[in-house]
Image: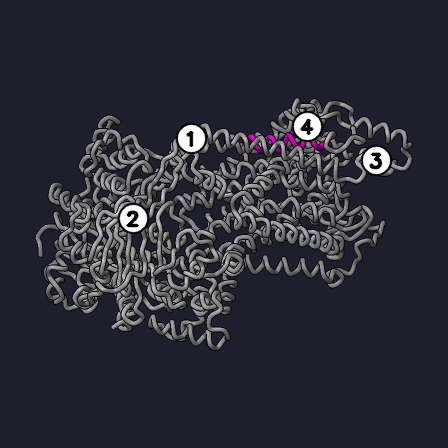
Amino acid sequence: MLRYVALKVGRALFVVWAAFTLTFVLLFVLPANPVDLLFDPAEINAVPPEVRERVAENYGFNEPVLLQYLDRLGHALTGDFGNSVQSGRPVTAAILDVLPSTLILAAGALVLALVIAFVIALVATSTRHDWVRNLVEALPSTSVSVPVFLSGILILQIFSFQLGWFPAFGDEGWRSLVLPLVTLAIPVSGPIAQLLVRSFAKEFHSGYVTTSWAKGATRGAIVIGDVFRNASLPALTIAGVTFGNLIAGSVITETVFARKGIGRMTQTAINTLDLPLVQGIVVLVAASFALINLVVDLTYPVLDPRLRATLAAPTAKAASGGAR
Amino acid sequence: MSTVDPLLRITDLAIDYRTGHREWTTAVRGASLHVQPGEFVSLVGESGSGKTTLVHAALGLLPPAARIRSGAIAYSDVDVTGWNDRRMALVRGNYVGFIPQDPNTSLNPVKKIGQQVVEAVRFNAPKPGNAERHHQAALDSLRTAGLKDVERVFQQYPHELSGGMKQRALIAIALAGKPRIIVADEPTSSLDVTVQKVILDHLVRLREELDIGILLVTHNLGVALDRSDRILVMRDGEIVEQGPVDQVLEQSTNEYTRRLLDAAPTRLAASFGARPVRAEAPYVLRARALSKTYRLRGRGQRRDLRAVDGVDLAVRKGTTHAIVGESGAGKSTLASILVGFTAPDRGTVHIGDTELTGRRRGRLREIRRHLQFVFQNPFTSLDPRFTVGRIVAEPLHAFGLAPGRAQRTARVVELLAAVALDESYLHRLPGQLSGGQRQRVAIARALALNPEILVLDEAVSALDVSVQAQILRLLVDLQAGYGLSYVFVTHDLGVVRLVADDVTVMKDGVAVETGPVERVFGEPRHPYTRELLDAIPGTRLALAGPG
Amino acid sequence: MTVELETLAPPAAARPAFAPSLAGRAAELVRQPMLVLSWLVVAVVIGWAVVPDLFTSYGPYDGDTTASFAPPSLEHWFGTDRLGRDLFARSVYGARTTLIATLLAVVIAFGIGTVVGLVAGFAGGIVDTAVMRVVDVFLAIPSLLLAMVVVSVLGYSTQNIALAVGISSIASFARVMRAEVLSVVTQDYVKAAYGLGVGRLGVMLRHVVPNSLNSVVALAALEVGTAVLAVASLGFLGYGAPPPQPEWGLLVAEGRDFVAVHPWTSILPGVALAIVVIATHRISASFRKDRRR
């Protein structure tokens, strides 16, 4: 048990460290002259050499790469990713500023997406009509096919410009949250719903369901009492994918609805080549991903008695990783 | 005709499966059967005969792709044909209990056994009772199903029980609704013979104690003959024979039934004849003190599994040495060591005078020419993308034998002919072949290098009994023709008597008894050997002898 | 005796054939109108990319300021934009930019990912562990974010978008390929090939690769749709081709400022894009069904 936890925690820490190193290589080592990235490309020739020199020194670009790396890593360990180039504020503070806004959006969208996905799976499993099932099963693949920026614009057009039910932009009050939330929930629900539909169908045709029929159980009792729990567990295995969809979706959603948040900040940081901020965001995202997967790995055995028995056995890894 | 209403009466039932847009394929045609109170009826058929479809129809468990075209299903003369799930729920559990095929997948893995039995009690309780009474009823049911220490089993999850215990839990679930008839669909085919015997004996006892009717579905004629009052034989969706056991056994007029009877291993012995004595033949394979331990990690601490523990084995030229045992006995690991797939921790294997163990991959390859392997499952041992011709040619290709296209094809055709397959099979894919044909291809491939020894790991277990008989005969013929030596791994003692000269009985990784077949079967020295021999189904079949 | 008994087993012809005949397949296709439609959509879009002038008489840059913001009509199917450029023509010409970028991205992801997964799965041991930990890291960074970072380092252009999208999808291909290889390697027919004296390389090339590729190919089909979306998203965010060029994501972004008054400017090119992605997903789903057969 302890071994299992230690292994998973070690892996999570490795992922965060590697994400830091990867962004360091991508952002600070690979570019021929990282100082240039710090200036607006249009003005780069107008910048006097001594200013560039000073900036380079400021960022430590004159030091050997290894020293720069260790210096940045040391600071990152204490939560210091340097100062944002644009605003001059510490990266950590800037991120913490907008984090709550994105967290609310992402959490709300996740809940909504789960509700949509489970409704789709339950309807597809419980219905006796083929056409209802076919219709409902077509929904998830459509929802992952429509680009987020399009569905955002469509929703904006209909519910804000035409009907005037909700404000179009900004982040004041709960009404401004509704449209972005729906926009983000649609693409996030797709993969979850696809997985749940498959896993509900698979469990519904498994041997123990036949046993339950033979016991005299009704359809409702079987779907709720037997299938639901067994079929829901696999949804945890795509928690990482879901998280990635939430982040990618929020970049676009926040841009379309002009909301402040991590997504929009990422876009601005990339546009202005705010390297410390970009690195801070990437490490934060990787750390969140690692944390989520860690939580999933640690709760899975609690939910599935079979895994509890064979905790550290290799099969546990295969079961949680193979379905992705 | 009996005056009592039969518990279950199926009349002229025909069932179709949807195979295309408006295409239907008939799975069951005009089948009729009935089960009287206190009667034990067996429905026997090979795979694809429609027997499972028939009983699923009786319980209203047909998949949506199936339809009942005509006929009627009645319980105590109440016609339930075409009832929907809601109405059938009143019949299932209450009136008819069902014991499913595979105990390993038929229990909900995330619910405790007790809860699953209580549900069966609750769904079928005449009026809503209190939880305590249901709990007691569930415990009673588990006890009736022959489980001991029921309080503990009640709190356990399915994965914590053995296969036999799971099947008893399923029997408890079937009994929980106090049904008047129990339908059992191959209830023991995934269990070891010794467990199988105990479970079936228990069913017979239940029938007497509770005066219920039992309908047993099985592919094993021996099992059916040993315990039933009446037998129905099914083939291609039709019931081709029915009658009391003695009548079927002694004076069956149906050709198919006769063939099934003759194909049963216990019956085949006569037609296979006595095996020639080759006591003087030199040893071609000798294994000494083989041991293999697997390290299991589970429940926090490590546990060692001694899969093979100090086993000796010797095979004489031109003879068959059978290795028998139940699941987990280590016989497959042993076979895997003999051919060099698995490296033993200790011990040696000699092929002739060359040592196989401790060789590097390259040197091992040379020995492959003398030693080949045939797998249990012909559905997984052939690459689905290769044609039969390419499959059989693969070893020739690997060793650069029979160079040139024409020469290689000629050799492949020759090999296929040896296993009674003609040239038309050359360009077929494994997916287009039946199980028996696939196993023939696998044998042809194994023979391609002219090996001296074949290791056959449960090579006939996945096949229907009639196909099994053909493959066994083929193996015996090939042995005589090419002077092959076999290591024959099996769980089926009936087969051993047919093809083997020597036998080694394994249990928990240890060889408990070894010797010539006549001696070991005639005067078993180890109690476990005796237990295994007693559990072989089909004693009545053997006693009756070939008619 | 032997031949006689063979009749006991159901004849091979009665079993479902492994590979249905071409005619059978065609007949099956007709019964799935949505699938036919999907193939048709994809064919048309490929046509747009290869010979755009066959599909529209307007050029992508020909503006007519007197006809700015014309609503959709027979003359201008998708309407016109601020500069009076025909939006349908811009969508048609945009297909080339977007599709070439998509193709490049899928080829990069498929090519590198498959090889990495094959090596990891087949070599096992320390190689496998090392490769998979690296893959873990790439999976931990959402692909859109990773693509944004890569594009910011490489510079803004459609080629770089393609590269970025391709790189960010390598990990998922590697993962699927490795899982598939690991499951194929345990199959009896692979063991049997070793037992027959086939060498490691032979086993890999003859048995493991062909049997593992199935699900990776299905993933590649799915990835086409995903990559179109990713390329368009990056274009939408402004990391792709510079403005006068037609590119699907950029078209939507350009119309976005006028969407309140002239909704067609954004929505019609966007809907065209969505239909293409839906079609590719439908096709990839049919691949997966074929495999299950």
Using the image, tell me which numbered label, if any, was put on residue A40: 3
Q: Is the same chain shared between marks 3 and 4?
A: yes
Tell if the residue under mark 3 belongs to the same chain as the one under mark 2.
no
Identify the mark nearer the N-term, 3 or 4: 3
Chain on which label 2 sits? B
User: Which numbered marker is on residue A302?
Assistant: 1
Label 1 chain ID: A
Q: Which residues are magenta?
A: A278-292
Callout 1: helix, strand or loop?
helix
Q: Is residue B134 visible?
A: yes
Q: CA distance from mark 1 to mark 4?
A: 36 Å
Q: Amino acid at mark 2?
A: Val
The answer to which of A159 and C175 lies nearer the viewer is C175
Label 1: how many residues lie within 10 Å, few (<14), some (14-19) or many (20+)? Answer: few
Neighbor class of circle 3 (other Cα within 10 Å; few <14, some 14-19, many 20+) is few
- Label 4 sits on what residue type? Leu
Is B254 a magenta residue? no
Same chain shared by disc 2 and disc 4: no
Q: Which mark is residue B118?
A: none
Q: Name the image quarter holding residue A144.
A: top right
Q: Mark 2 — residue?
A: B311
Q: Quadrant of the N terminus of chain C?
A: bottom left
User: Please, what secondary structure does the residue beneath circle 3 have?
Assistant: loop
**Quick check: can you spot residue B29?**
no
x, y (%) of residue B359?
44, 53
Instruction: Please tell me whether residue A288 belongs to the stretch shown in magenta.
Output: yes
Would you call the spot at circle 2 few (<14 residues within 10 Å), some (14-19), or many (20 or more)? some
